[in-house]
Image (tube, rainbow, N blue to C red):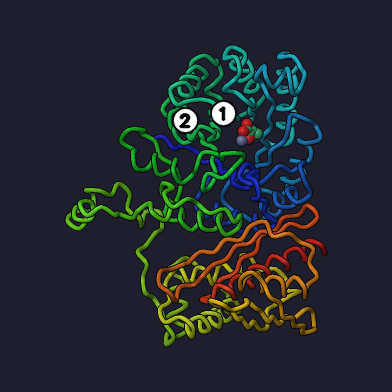
Amino acid sequence: MRIIRIFDTTLRDGEQSPGASMNVQEKLTLAKQLAKLGVDIIEAGFAFSSPGDFEAIKIIGSEVEGPIICSLARAKEEDIQRAWEALKDAPKRRIHTFHSTSDIHLKYQFRVSREDALKRSVEMVKLARSLVEDVEFSPMDATRTDINYLCEVVEAVIEAGASTVNIPDTVGYSIPVEFGAMIKAIHDRVKNINEAVISVHCHNDLGLAVANSLSAVLNGAGQIECTINGIGERAGNCSMEEVVMALRTRRDLFHADTRINTEEIIRGSRLVTKITGISVQPNKAIVGANAFAHESGIHQDGLLKEKSTYEIIRPESIGLYSTKLVLGKHSGRHAFKTRLKELGYVLTDEELNKTFERFKRLADQKKDIFDEDIEALISEDVTKVPEVYSLVDLYIVSGLNQKPTAAVKLKVGENIIDRLEHGDGPVDATYKAIASITNTKSRLLKFEVKGITGGTDALGEVIVSLEEEGRTVRGHGADTDIIVASAKAYINALNKLEARRR
Ligand code: KIV
Ligand code: ZN
């Protein structure tokens, strides 16, 4: 069985999804989850592009054990030096450098000849190799590059020391037969190809990123670049969960597998949604809410008789266990701790005390506590920032023929401030009161409410995005009362803006 390497670029290309920017802490949290998933390489960012990316790569390199940590770098000296500075404390490190090779890019964007592009690529691979052992090179826009020239570039960069050559379908233009044939041509025609791993990096503009990556595997690719939930530039990248589960489910056909611990998939997917605020569509393969929901009576009948009649993947294999009623108001600290452990969370005593307190408060409001409720409690910690503002009290008047009114009391530093406002609805009134207390000039870009579990007593989760002076932040809030959850989400985002300002 061939092992296909998984190169995760959620923190780099994934972050290029509109509105998906992550702060250093969020990137570190996600990188730890990627390590639990067992990815082979984490592309932690593009060191030269911003101080935030530089810092994230540095911290991930020194704190996350297991995967190789990688920084992207254009084929420029200053980029490669910066990547090296960010990576030097990482025990396992890689520099990924790239240069366009298609005539369209060379002529219109970079205004350089094919010869100059080749020469620069070789020089920069050599420079990267003088700093690190492990160098990857990408001929950008490979799928629109003349195949003879592409093979020439690939051979030259391997000769210069690249141990991985990545073939990007940068604009998501290729289709599976054609992309597979391109990988085969590289495999057959490049003399020194056995000295490097062929990687693929497919974008999803035609909805074919996963299919193209799988076709590449059938034709000799040994590494797939992908992102959790398929997030990424424009229509996104190859989705990790889909490509990994396709290989696992059809090992018989691919004779290949990955090292991914698939039971961590659903947790990884939810974490990405939580951090980026980008939800997956319900019918998304593997991680969508309906991916394992069988509606048809005929299917349900078959499933009851024998699961394999209509189920090709066991939900448990991606970490999805049927919602269990776990705890309630009378559950003790020990039962809570045990359940957390079963769900994969190991907390320090102090963290456990705090979470248990919140659990007890929730159990007072909600009779049955499900696994998803516990995960929501835990994930509040992921999005926590120092609190300049905190909610002390909220009183709402709303209903048919009522003027929606909110009385909000916030703790601002050491002071308690309250305001009463009217609005188009209770959330609008609440947000007006909070905006008036905090004097925020931010703009609300997104407001999303969803129920975490079923039932009218379900926890409601609210995600908001705020923009202020070009900075965008996301806030989360969860509560059995969706107006309180909305207030918490807004306050969480305002605290993030404060933290960034400071
Ligand atoms: O899509 C692309 O071509 C890229 C490269 C930097 C590999 O993201
Ligand atoms: Zn890309």
Rendered location of residue 18, percent (x, y): 65, 46
Q: Is mark 1 within 8 Å of ligand 1?
A: yes
What type is the residue that disc 1 sits on? Asp
Foreground: 479 or 325? 479
Q: How far is mark 2 from mark 1, CA to CA?
A: 9 Å
Please state the quadrant of the image where ligand 2 appears.
top right
Foreground: 432 or 195? 432
Q: Residue at x 51, y 41 (%)?
A: 6
Foreground: 405 or 260? 405
Is the residue 200 above or below the residue 368 in the image? above
Q: Quadrant of the N terminus?
A: top left
Rendered location of residue 364, percent (x, y): 48, 85
User: Considering the numbered disc 2 on the image, is that residue within a helix, a strand or a loop?
Assistant: helix
**Badge 1 is on which residue?**
169
Residue 318 lies left or right of residue 478; in this view the side is left
What type is the residue that disc 2 sits on? Asn
User: Is the C-beta separation of discs 2 and 1 under 8 Å?
Assistant: yes
Q: Residue at x 64, y 18 (%)?
A: 153
Residue 126 lies left or right of residue 382; in this view the side is right
Rendered location of residue 231, percent (x, y): 56, 45
- Circle 1 crowding by C-alpha within 10 Å: few under 14, some 14–19, many from 20: many
Residue 212 numbered tag: 2
Q: Residue at x 54, y 64 (%)?
A: 449
